[in-house]
Image (cartoon, rainbow, N blue to C red):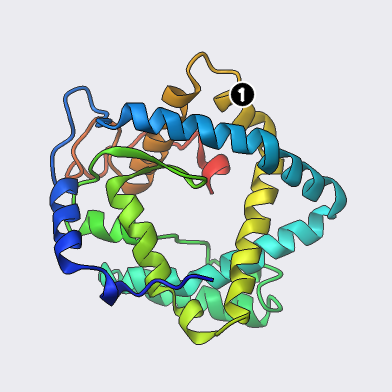
Amino acid sequence: MIKFNLFRLSPVLIVAFLAGCSAPNSTGGINDPYEETNRSWHDTNVALDRAVIKPVSTAYGTVVPDPLRKGLANVSDTLSIPGTVVNDVLQVQLGDAVHNTARFLVNATVGIAGLFDPATSMGLEPRDSDFGETLHRWGVGEGAYVVLPVYGPSTERDALGLVVDIALDPIGHVFGTPESSYKTGLKVAKLADTRYRYSDLYESLVYDSADGYAQMRLTYLDNRHYALGTPIGASDSAEGQATPYDIYEDFYE
């Protein structure tokens, strides 16, 4: 398994990348200067979904009982909490850091290594965060919309955040090989379960739309802006103006 070390990333490349992300969105609200390349990767990802991801997720959802799939997804979520706490601290959201630490301790113990989620019923609901949000709170613009191979829709800021989250992941540093690879396996299992549970929604969005690429782009950006409190088409500084509900929450959670 490839491990990323944040401190080995070239400072010059990071500064250049952040400078690009700081550029304001283009007129019209959607900054997509790489559309031709993005569409190519979108088509490749859809072909991969048809050929591999959908059959695997269908088999997983059919063979593995629902309680076990849900339990494995809970374990994956629990193992991701320490990384969330790191971002809470970097954002100086100390209340969320304490909340998420308590959630981790409860689910890791009472929840039997995270198989169950008693923390939510105790008022310790999930409060997710990532380094993309950390960059947003630090004033870094989201940059252009990009489609990543396999991973799918993102932005320049969130793509960098994804790499840094991998580098900063406490679980990955605490456990060596092969233990650290178990987390990756659990994450894949959760994604397969999500793909199976929301198969109709995903396929209506990507397969049945007149322009699946444009629909996926709008869906991702709308959901991301909702999570950050910035409605689509607005600058990142426009806090607290998101729509009152998130119609894509189930699909992207």
Q: Residue at x 21, y 34 (%)?
A: 234
Q: Residue at x 24, y 54 (%)?
A: 136
Q: Which residue is at the front of the view, 155 or 194?
A: 155
Q: Quadrant of residue 6?
A: bottom left
Q: Quadrant of residue 69?
A: bottom right
- Residue 39 at x, y = what percent? 42, 28
Q: Residue at x 47, y 32 (%)?
A: 42
Residue type, mark 1 in image: Ser
- Residue 59 at x, y = what percent? 81, 46
Q: Which residue in the protein does label 1 denote?
A: 204
Instruction: Report the side of 249 relative to 226 (left or right).
Output: right
Q: Residue at x 45, y 61 (%)?
A: 127
Q: Residue furthest top?
A: 210
- Residue 206 at x, y = what percent? 56, 26
Residue 197 at least partly seen: no
Which image quadrant: the N terminus?
bottom right
